[in-house]
């Protein structure tokens, strides 16, 4: 959740924001509407930690921005026109950004480029990209690390009608359905873990993510049984928790994202 409490922003003699209160719930889509110059972008910059408000506080997932943390964790951000190194290719730009947090790899970058329709242009210099292509690259950058939260400033700017339609069709109800609960499993051998889940728990209701995490949509109330089955199979589990699908999963599903995977065949 995001709480904006009494936030004001004054730059020189201009009052940009005045006593703003805002509450954004998890799993919801919230839009900021206003005329040009009304402060929408500046408010998003305050929320994301790029600008410090003159007064008030912003609490993002329980952490005060500017005090507990400088920037919100695990958040995909597009503010204004996405900026990239113009003499790097689209792929190299994403690779350099991904190397900062190590949350995705080469295959993950290539996968997200395919999803936004830039794979064929991945080796093209960004300076030769059109506005729409740069915006798609910005969306890829915002989504590639599997964020819990997306903060997008004019995300439809420069996009073609197909991408605009994808965003316009999003509804709160569908988002809540997509962000469904699951058991997140991190194991040293995820392929073997998939086989065990199918053979011992008799389920194929799972998904293997690009980072190797398994999402199991059954046995949500029996975490101990899942842990015991994996332990009995001598699979080293490094993480086991109940969570929910991310906004990346939802967005990618709208443009042809990952399907539930079947267990690997040998």
Image: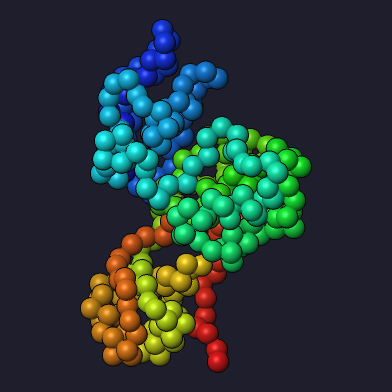
Viewer-nearest residue: 265 or 12? 12
Give the farthest residue toward the top: 13
Residue 55 in view, yes or no: yes
- Examine the rendered structure and indicate whether residue 242 appears above or below residue 206: above
Residue 229 in view, yes or no: no
User: Does 258 sit left or right of 183 as displayed?
Assistant: right
Residue at the image point whose x is 43% and y is 47% from the top: 75
* Residue 216: x %, y % from top left: 39, 73
- Examine the rendered structure and indicate whether residue 115 appears above or below residue 82: below
* Residue 112: x %, y % from top left: 60, 58
Viewer-nearest residue: 14 or 18? 14
Assign the N terminus to one quadrant of the image: top left
Residue at the image point whose x is 45% and y is 25% from the top: 42
Q: Quadrant of residue 242?
A: bottom left
Residue at the image point whose x is 73% and y is 40% from the top: 127
* Residue 97: x %, y % from top left: 54, 50
């Amino acid at each position: 959740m995001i709480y904006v409490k009494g936030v004001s922003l004054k730059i020189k003699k201009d009052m940009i924001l005045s006593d703003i209160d805002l509450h954004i719930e998890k799993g919801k889509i919230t839009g900021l509407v206003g005329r040009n110059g009304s402060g929408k972008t500046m408010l998003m910059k305050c929320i994301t930690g790029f600008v410090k408000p003159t007064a008030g506080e912003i609490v993002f997932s329980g952490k005060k921005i500017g005090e507990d943390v400088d920037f919100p964790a695990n958040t995909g951000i597009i503010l204004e026109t996405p900026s990239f190194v113009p003499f790097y290719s689209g792929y190299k730009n994403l690779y350099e950004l991904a190397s900062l947090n190590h949350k995705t790899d080469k295959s993950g970058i290539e996968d997200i480029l395919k999803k936004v329709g830039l794979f064929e242009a991945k080796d093209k210099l960004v300076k030769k990209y059109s506005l729409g292509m740069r915006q798609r690259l910005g969306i890829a950058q915002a989504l590639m690390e599997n964020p819990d939260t997306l903060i997008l400033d004019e995300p439809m700017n420069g996009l073609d009608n197909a991408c605009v339609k994808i965003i316009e069709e999003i509804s709160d109800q569908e988002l809540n359905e997509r962000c469904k609960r699951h058991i997140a499993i991190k194991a040293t051998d995820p392929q073997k873990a998939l086989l065990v889940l199918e053979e011992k728990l008799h389920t194929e209701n799972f998904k293997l993510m690009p980072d190797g995490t398994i999402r199991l949509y059954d046995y949500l109330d029996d975490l101990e049984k899942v842990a015991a089955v994996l332990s009995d199979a001598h699979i080293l589990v490094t993480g086991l928790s109940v969570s929910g699908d991310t906004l990346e999963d939802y967005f990618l599903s709208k443009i042809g994202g990952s399907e539930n995977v079947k267990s690997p065949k040998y």
